[in-house]
Image (tube, grey):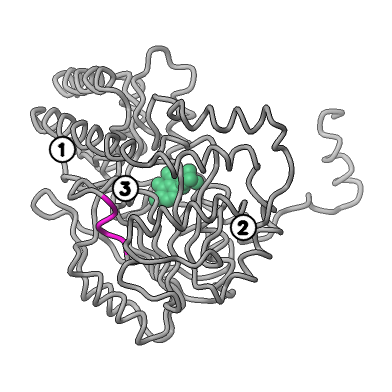
Amino acid sequence: MARDGHMTSELATGRSPPRARAAARDLAVSQVREVANAGFGAPNLAKFWFGEGDQPTPAFIREAAAQALAEGRTFYTHNRGAAELRAALGDYLQGLHGRAFRTDSLSITSGGISALMIAMQAVLDPGDHVVAVTPVWPNLVEIPRILNAKVTRVGLRAEDGIWRLDLDELLSAITPGTRLVLLNSPNNPTGWVLPPEDRAPLLDHCRRLGVWLLTDDVYERLDFRSPGAPGSFLPDSDPEDRLISANSFSKGWRMTGWRLGWLVAPPSLEPEIGKLLEFNTSCPPDFLQAGALAALKGATPYIDELRLELAARRDRLWAGLNAIDGIATARPDGAMYVLLRVMGETASVALAKRLIAEAGLGLAPGAAFGPESEGWLRWCFATGREAMDEGLTRLADWMGRRQ
Ligand code: PLP
């Protein structure tokens, strides 16, 4: 048994193999990945399962990073990002939200995921209670589990073709024993957007109880109701609120592979955020930060065009899905996803795998985002129109011959 050398020594010593701690072992495996892995190697698949488009980052951003790399910007920067980039982020946010932001409230992170991790490392203790609006991108509710905090889910419900939040249910779930509320709007996977009239009661409730509100704003520029970032809590908050906004360059600028994001947090957290960044990633690569600087400076009109294009694709996909007999949908107001149901099907992972094998179509299973979206499938509409039309044809054909 040479191949299992460790097993031989295990038998010899009577010891069990080394294992990670329980919180790490208990983390859920991504069911989007499970389905995607089942599809790798399948020829000619039309894939819409990941949250990204098929176009690279705009050239003006890539060129800025390439130039910085050519100039030798290959050194560490400040933990919270290069001063020039933080200043530009402050200007960008002021333009968007109509109020000034102190630079000690801003930090550049390694993607939206790192912004969320750092924020939660800064405020969560083991045993803390977190309330999350779900279904949601699974990483958001797994991070508290890494930190040994407990998550209570408040589920959106699809009613009359629209996802809705029961605000009273959310407010009553947030008690004096709650440490943190997690809110992602526009939401992945539903495309749900928090109604503007729900913002003030939620913020007031958190203020009264001294509860942290962490908003995952990575889709804030992809809100189809109006330009800008109409759903943000930042304009109505003051810098000492227990409010943290996690954001990313990934979705608004097509920069998923760059791993760049940012945090807006009360300035009183600045020392801890700096230390946590040091111990997690130290800082994002300097030459990539040059790309982020170009992205912020060129945000308008680039993002407005992207938003309009995505809204048009949403309409096209929406109409295409609703034209297929046996398909039900709930209309998204933002982000880049539509959830759909196939009548009579309730197990989304099995259904997603069948669609790969029988229709050549790659969709993400709703179960990956929580029990609230089990039975649904998520279709990302950030890909080009031709690919989308081909996907719709495959789905319609499959529905026609489905057993
Ligand atoms: N938050 C949500 C809701 C997301 O859907 C994603 C990515 O899909 C992220 C955060 C992470 O963004 P990033 O790729 O910048 O880490």
Q: Which numbered circle lies on residue 221?
A: 3
Return the residue at label 2: 80
The residue at 63%/46% (across/down) is 284
The quarter of the picture where residue 166 lies is bottom left
Direction from residue 297 to residue 64 in the image, left or right? right
Q: In which quarter of the image is residue 234?
A: bottom left
Q: Is residue 200 left or right of residue 73?
A: left
Q: What residue type is labelled 3?
A: Arg
Picture residue at 21% right of the left edge, 71% below the top: 167
Q: Give the range drawn in magenta.
A: 228-232
Please give the count of numbered marks on the rendered protein.
Answer: 3
Q: In this view, does 283 lie above or below 382?
A: below
Residue at the spot 43% in from the left edge and 33% down from the top edge: 35
* Residue 332 pos. (x, y %): 20, 46
Q: In this view, does 148 lie above or below 287?
A: below
Which of the marked residues, 2 or 1, is nearer the chain's N terminus?
Answer: 2
Residue 137 visible in the displayed image: no
Q: What element carries label 2?
A: loop
Identify the secondary structure beneath mark 1. loop
